[in-house]
Amino acid sequence: MKKSKLLFLWITLILWNTSDAQKTGIFDGHGDIGINVKPGAATYIPESGQYVISGAGENVWADHDEFHFVWKKMKGDFLLYTKAEFLGNWVTYHRKVGWMVRKSLDGNSPHVNAVEHGDGLTSLQFRRTAGAVTEEIKSKITKANIIQLERKGSTYTMRVAKYGEPFVTEQVTNIDLGDEVYVGLFVGSHNADVIETGVFRDVRITVPFNGDADNSTQMTLGSNLELMDIASGDRQIIYTVPYSIQAPNYTNDGKSLIFNGSDGLIYNFDLKSRTPRLINTGTIKSNNNDHVLSFDGKMIGLSSTVKELGGSIIYTVPLAGGTPNQITPKGPSYLHGWSPDGKSLVFCGERNGEYDVYKVPATGGTEVKLTTEKGLDDGPEYTPDGKYIYFNSVRSGLMQIWRMKPDGSEQEQVTTDDFNNWFAHISPDGKGMVFLSFLKEEVVPGVHPPYKHVYIRYVPITGGTPKVLAYVYGGQGSINTPSWSPDSKSIAFISNSDMTK
């Protein structure tokens, strides 16, 4: 972390700690764990979404613990995520920052923690019963700053990464901490006389879907509308609802986002007031998450279910609202791209049992089949210069990103890794693209369900190794549509959580 940022955090911490009302953000409380522990502190900074936590203590190990804990009580299954780092130089290399789940606030309580040490050691630690010796599973990587801890029943899974890289996973089973537990962030100094400080950002506590979601799963979980700065990787939740909203895309002026709701309607979300406004789409009210804006920003293309016509049908309507114009005569037809000159739409269509990429005039007319390989071809989108159409195809065995010329010629594979990659979105400046990656063990090729562990990844348009931008609980509906800001500096996406619990 740069010195200017360190100074800002220290000044902010001092100012906040002068207040009588110590705020802890999404947590219920905080305090020192153990006996006669040098007093720690915790500060939440709303402007940046950061938690700055200071703690002392001899250790988090053996048969008892000493540290500072910021916690909330939770029941059932959950998924914890943060980007964590230490503040300042370390005194003892075993100082610790991370997530912890405890049965009680007693120093010898059973617990599970996912932790990074001062020397970079990253591990899953656990005490099975009160006063028992702490056990440890060391990660295959060190110096992880992305820390995730998930509970499913009595199984705890740690996923850790150096930001930009995929997760490395460790797991422990048969840890019974009871249904209601203390969940939170912690800092320990490994030195009773020294206070160490950790900084946590992008803190997320997710209540996952109860079961194994597939393509038929009804999307009922709550939604976080998030913005991400591409350069820094910083995330910000700007809108939260306890139901499903999907597929945000920016308007050309950068002042609004367009998304679809679970009610089948389309909304314009004003970024200044943080409020949604219904867009009039006439009688077309079964819209899904395959909606696209024209390059000039004046029109929106919709995909809306019409059962008697075979499923999803494509329409266009002015962004200001009006009477939609039907484009495709039959379905399923899922819109994904609009040509830069405004003359053509590209979509995924099912015809005679095969899903392929098609092109059709933006005013309606004869559709042209652009792909002919067996298996699903989906998600077509034009580059801003109109020279290529990017799409995803399962023809290689896994879902991968491909591209072709606008007439369907010169089809070539772009990504070649062990993920299932969907929905390539090219930045307005044409320099890079983001896409959604499902872990191979999470899905079978050719499906993109909701409520999975997914990555949003970035790669330069010239090629290279994709970088993980965001570690997301989501999938279907997270980033189906072009979601870049007009200045190519940020993206919008949806993450999910059960907000009824």
Image: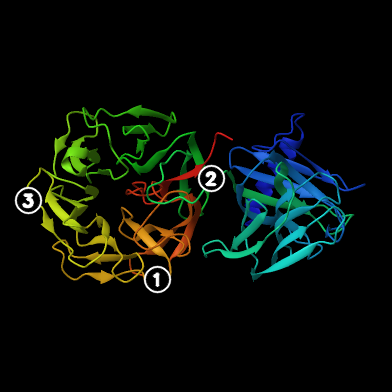
Say the numbered circle drawn on residue 210: 2
In the visual, does 279 lie left or right of 366? right
Q: Position of residue 354 (x, y in %)?
A: 21, 59
Whether the residues at callouts 3 and 2 have beta carbons within 8 Å, the answer is: no
How packed mark 1 is, by other alpha carbons closer than 10 Å (few <14, some 14-19, many 20 or more), is few
Frontmost of labels 2 and 1 is 2
In the visual, does 18 lie left or right of 217? right
Q: Earlier in the sequence, mark 2 or mark 1?
A: 2
Outermost right residue: 36
How packed mark 3 is, by other alpha carbons closer than 10 Å (few <14, some 14-19, many 20 or more), is few
Picture layout, residue 28 above or below residue 173: above
Whether residue 480 appears in this view of the structure is yes
Q: Earlier in the sequence, mark 1 or mark 3?
A: 3
Q: Secondary structure at mark 2?
A: loop
The CA distance from mark 3 to mark 2 is: 44 Å
Picture layout, residue 83 above or below residue 75: below
In this view of the protein, which residue sits in the foreground, 370 or 463?
370
Frontmost of labels 1 and 3 is 3
Whether residue 87 appears in this view of the structure is no
Location of the N terminus (image quadrant): bottom right
Say the numbered circle drawn on residue 464: 1
- The amino acid sitting under disc 3 is Thr
Q: Quadrant of residue 254?
A: top left
- The amino acid sitting under disc 2 is Asn
Q: Position of residue 117 (x, y in %)?
A: 73, 63
Frontmost of labels 3 and 2 is 2
Say the numbered circle drawn on residue 366: 3
The CA distance from mark 2 to mark 1 is: 37 Å
